[in-house]
Image (tube, rainbow, N blue to C red):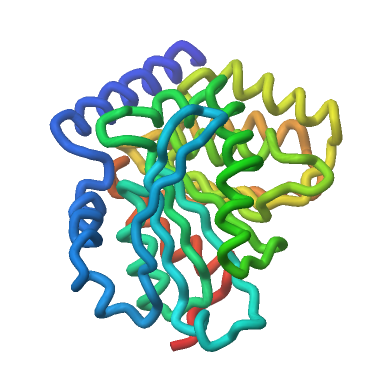
Amino acid sequence: MRNTKNLINLLIVMLVVLSSIGKNLYAEDDNKISEIKKPVWGQYFNGKYVGKSLFTSKITGVTYPYHVYLPASYENNPNKVYPIIYALDGQWSLGGLVITIDRDNRDIIVVAIEEGPEESNRRAIDYRLPGATLYTEFFKQEFLPSIESTYRIDADNRSVQGTSLSGIMTTAFLFLDDHKTPLFKNYIAYDAAYWDNPELMQRLIKNRLQIENRMDSNLYLTTAFPLGNHFFVMDFIDNLEQYAIPGLNIHHEWYMVKHDNIFDASIDNTLDLIYGKPTL
């Protein structure tokens, strides 16, 4: 039975890889990124697209482009702090995330950080174990403090979002985060590629639980079925639930879409779950 399940999982991975050949993940959102570079793109927002900047890390030695969006109420409320979503794979996720948040007029700051220089494929290093450990230090020591010294952030209401390989990274954040003062409240992973180095992920979880068994955090998982990582994510959830971690809330939804379309399928429901239904 286990051999049959492993064979099914292998076939699904092959189908996902083949379906992605010749195109980018989130191909639609990639087009939106190209529009962001035009001044006209932000004119239709209720909020403000601040723009694209570069951050050079001394820890990883990589220069990361990133984008910032501020909600409509930000400039007129100088004493207010705001929840924030740090979105990984910003080269793809920015457009869909900002358009959805702005459409619903949500009071949320978005910082979307790209994988690194164009065609560098840094996501294959930074978002995977063991490279995720160094990327966590970059985020904790350099990137997050820089952002939050500039913008008014609610430090008790941070979220981090990733998809596929960057979904591994958001999960790694959960188990690499400080057990006393975690950086994030919500960890969001869409169709995470848990087939990649599962032994290292299990070791990471066990090491974290040896330090402190309790985790007061929320893990939001979605999966694409059948052409996605659904079965791998289900295996991950089954293994994680065996630890019965106090305080860890796991929420899972699946969608009958391809892997490439999981972001668009997931984002509305995720925002509703975390922040409530929008009041328009």
Q: Quadrant of residue 31?
A: bottom left
Residue 46 falls in which quadrant of the image? bottom left
Residue beneath the point at 55% across and 41% down: 170
Q: Please state which of residues 148 and 104 is positioned toward the viewer in this rendering.
A: 148
Total marks in image = 0
Q: Position of residue 2 (x, y in %)?
A: 51, 15
In the visual, does 88 lie left or right of 219?
left
Give the camera-side residue of 63 and 232. Answer: 63
Q: Is residue 21 above or below residue 44?
A: above
Question: Measured from the top left, where is residue 241 in percent x and y?
Answer: 70, 37
Seen at 70% across and 39% down, the residue is 177
Residue 190 in view here: no
**Residue extending furthest toward the left:** 22
- Is residue 6 left or right of 177 when viewed as pictured? left
The residue located at (58%, 52%) in the rendering is 146
Question: In the figure, 272 relative to 241: above or below?
Answer: below
Percent x, y for residue 202? 65, 22
Quadrant of the snapshot with the C terminus: bottom left
Is any part of residue 230 visible from this angle? yes
Residue 11 % position (x, y)? 31, 21
Residue 35 relative to residue 97: left or right: left
Q: Is residue 68 left or right of residue 121?
A: right
Q: Residue lying furthest top in this view?
A: 3
What residue is at 67 percent from the left and 67 percent from the top? 154
